[in-house]
Amino acid sequence: ILNVEQSPQSLHVQEGDSTNFTCSFPSSNFYALHWYRWETAKSPEALFVMTLNGDEKKKGRISATLNTKEGYSYLYIKGSQPEDSATYLCACFSGSARQLTFGSGTQLTVLP
Amino acid sequence: NAGVTQTPKFRILKIGQSMTLQCAQDMNHNYMYWYRQDPGMGLKLIYYSVGAGITDKGEVPNGYNVSRSTTEDFPLRLELAAPSQTSVYFCASRSDHRSPLHFGNGTRLTVT
């Protein structure tokens, strides 16, 4: 079982602020890193899947980077909006590439 | 496409009762997963399958069983329900190891 950690656990920001969260994972036998956005009372939706060291992905105001050598990924949100309020989950795929281990998530609240 | 369909959406069980949570996907995905969501703990993997006829235990398999007789269906069986199994259960699927997970809408189960 992998140890996938996310920080901070929760975060409150003002509308318009930019913010970022961290996901750390074991760097050995790394295969892929996933980010998901999970709104209350809904199911998680995929944001990014990254596999290569140095990968950077972007979707609108949200972007992510990956460092597989040191075992971390950052998720950035530029100009946060209230609709960005959600829990952001990262998940790591490694070893046999059959199991995806999730972190506990970062709960973001964007205040209007 | 319906994607990943879970039934039922809600269920209340008495201790010791049994039930099957249904999951079906119409995307011809080989990989299917069952997760449970525990407060503050993110998603924990119960069982997974890499194809019809193949299943394997995840992180928290005790008290559950699965089968995968077809590519489309991956039911989760609770034989003797216990209060510790009160949770929200998510089924997910993906096509290959580079693809993100597609989640169902979840089943909220209460055992009293």
Image (cartoon, grey):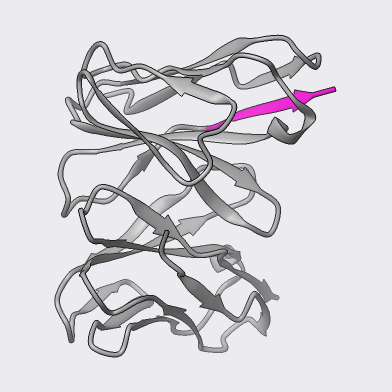
Q: Residue B2 location in percent, x, y?
A: 33, 23
The residue under the point 72% across, 9% down is B17
Quadrant into which the C terminus of chain B falls:
top right
Whether B40 is drawn above or below B43: the answer is: below
Identify which residue, A2 or A67, lies in the foreground. A2
Quadrant into which the N terminus of chain B falls:
top left
Asked where in the image residue B75 lies, by quadrant, the reply is top left
Q: Is residue B111 magenta?
A: yes
Residue reaching furthest to the front: B62
Identify which residue, A66 or B47, lies in the foreground. B47
Asked where in the image residue B98 lies, by quadrant, the reply is bottom left
The residue under the point 25% across, 21% down is B26
Q: Is residue A44 magenta?
A: no
The residue under the point 54% across, 67% down is A84
Q: Residue B89 location in percent, x, y?
A: 56, 33
Q: Main secondary structure of the magenta part?
A: strand
Q: Residue A54 location in percent, x, y?
A: 18, 86
Whether B68 is drawn above or below A53: the answer is: above
Query: What count of labels does the image hold?
Result: 0
The residue under the point 15% across, 44% down is B96
Residue segment shown in magenta: B106-112
Identify which residue, B6 or B55, lies in the foreground. B55
Identify which residue, A24 or B106, lies in the foreground. A24
User: Is residue A23 left or right of B7 when viewed as pictured?
Assistant: left
User: Is residue B38 left or right of B103 when viewed as pictured?
Assistant: right
Q: Residue A5 location in percent, x, y?
A: 51, 74
